[in-house]
Image: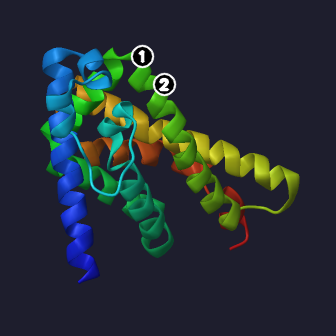
Amino acid sequence: MKDRRQDRIRTQRRVTLARALERAETEGLAALLNPGPDAAAGLKSPNLEAQPLDLLFLDEDDLRTWFAEALEAIGLLESALAWARHLEEEGDLWRRRLALNDREPRLRARRGELDEAWRNLLRAHFRRWGAAGVAGERIASVEAELTLAALRGAERLWLEGGGRPLLPILVREALATLWPALYAHARKGR
């Protein structure tokens, strides 16, 4: 029963997100931030007290939680590829969101704030696999920054290419380039 409820909530969030994106694209971000009473009724989300700007990031927590679980179960490369395939499944919607984020400074700023949670997630992962001590903390932070930059860079190339190459290909290329710098301490111990 709990799974069906969670699925229903996710579906409602996706519908709300799609409506918010449509409204922001057609009427501008200001219409989303200051909706009239009729528009606000169509942008309600269950179990969420979101600010209007957050309507465009409704699935952020779910996606990050899922990524964290996958990261522990199947590792960085497979988690990143699964994340890329997820975005690719609704590629048009995601590229529209990314394009809107690029055009709107407030959305870029909000995404930057949300990216801090991604950095913390990746930093914690690399800490578990890295060296102990102050140097290990620094290296884990660098690895987290590089990984997030690789993923965001792949997104940007995907957006600029209109969906070509496919996002999983871009993610694989980005992480392959970065891979020699990741988990270096863990590999030395083998």
- Depth check, front residue: 46 or 54: 46
The amino acid marked with disc number 1 is: Pro
**Residue 105 falls in image quadrant:** top left
Q: Name the residue under label 1.
A: 105
Identity of the residue drawn at 68% across and 74% down: 190
Within the image, what quadrant is residue 34 found in? top left
Q: In this view, does 19 lie to the left or right of 171?
A: left
Q: Are marks 2 and 1 in contact (CB under 8 Å)?
A: yes
Quarter of the view holding residue 74? bottom left
Given residues 133 and 175, the one toward you in this image is 133
Residue 68, position as x, y percentages in the image: 48, 63
Neighbour tally class for label 1: few under 14, some 14-19, many 20 plus, Cα within 10 Å = few
In-image side of 149 versus 70 (left or right): right
Q: Is residue 165 visible?
A: no
Mark 2 sits on what residue?
Answer: 109
Q: In this view, does 186 lie to the left or right of 38?
A: right
- Residue nearer the viewer, 178 or 124: 124
Where is residue 93? Give x, y as percent: 16, 38
Estimate the x, y position of residue 135 in percent, counting from the top left. Answer: 83, 50
Residue in view at x 61 percent, y 50 percent = 120
Q: Which amino acid does label 2 sit on?
A: Ala
